Image: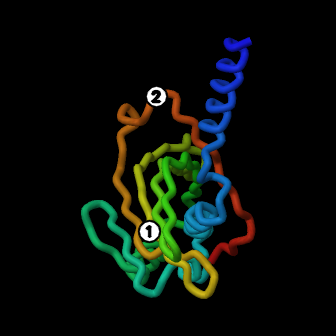
Amino acid sequence: MRLNKILLFTLLLTALNFNGYAQDTLEFKVVQDFFAATSAHDYQAIKGLATTDFQLLEIDEIWNMDYLIQLMKKANKAVKRRNFFKPIKQVKKDNMLWLSYWNKAEFSFEEQPARAVYWLESVVMVKENNQWLIQMLHSSRVKVEKLPKNIQFNEYINLNFKVE
C-alpha cells in the first residue's frame, strides 16, 4: 500500500512538471501573447502588452520598445516564427512579479527547413490598471547542447493578432 502511495505521488509530481505551473497562469499568457504578437508583426499589440518604460536586454544590448519595433519593421516578413515555451518559475508580490522560462522559436522561410533557436529568459511584470504588463525582458541565447535533458516545450499560438 505504501509503495502505491509513493508511486501515485511520483506520477502526480511528474504530471505537474510536464504541464508547467506557470504555463496556465494569466501572467505567463502575457509573455506568450507578446511573442505571438511579435510573430504576427502586430506592433500595437506588442506595445499594449508592455509598460511605456519597457526595456529589453538582448544580445548584450539594451533596447526600448521603439528600437525593437524599428528592428521588426526592417525584418523580412516572409520569415515565419513559431513559439514554444517551458516555464521555470514565477514569483509574485503585490503588483509585481517575475517569471523565468525557456523559449524556443522555429524560424522558416518558404520551402527551407525550419531552424530552431533557444533562449533562457526572464521578465519583470507590473500590474497597471488591473492588467499585467511586461516592464523588463532579459534574453540569453542558449546552444541546444546546453538545454536541460528531456525538456519539453509547449507551442503557443494566438491567432487574434493582425499581421501588419
The Cα atoms of the two marked residues, 1 and 2, are separated by 27 Å
Q: Tag 1: residue type?
A: Val
Pair 1/2: label in front: 1
Furthest-front residue in view?
2
- Mark 2 nearby-residue class (10 Å; few <14, some 14–19, many ≥20): few
**SS under mark 2:** loop
Decide which of 150, 68 is in the foreground and name it: 150
Q: Is residue 9 left or right of residue 81?
A: right
Mark 1 and mark 2 residues within 8 Å of each other at the beta carbon = no
Judging by the rendered image, the residue that carries numbered circle 1 is: 124
Number of other residues with Cα within 10 Å of mark 1, as a class: few under 14, some 14 to 19, many 20 or more: many
Identify the residue shown where x is 57% and y is 56%.
81
- In the picture, the disc for residue 149 is 2
How many discs appear? 2
Dot label at residue 151: none
Lower sequence index among marks 1 and 2: 1
Q: Position of residue 75 (x, y in %)?
A: 46, 68
Quarter placement of the N terminus: top right
* Of the pair 94 and 160, the residue shown nearer to us: 94
Amino acid tagged 2: Lys
Quadrant location, the C terminus: bottom right
Is residue 31 shown left or right of residue 11?
left
Residue occupying the point 66% across, 73% down: 163
User: Which residue is at 52% across, 34% downward?
Assistant: 151
Kindly state the secondary structure of the residue where label 1 is placed: strand
Q: Percent position (x, y) of residue 140?
A: 34, 53
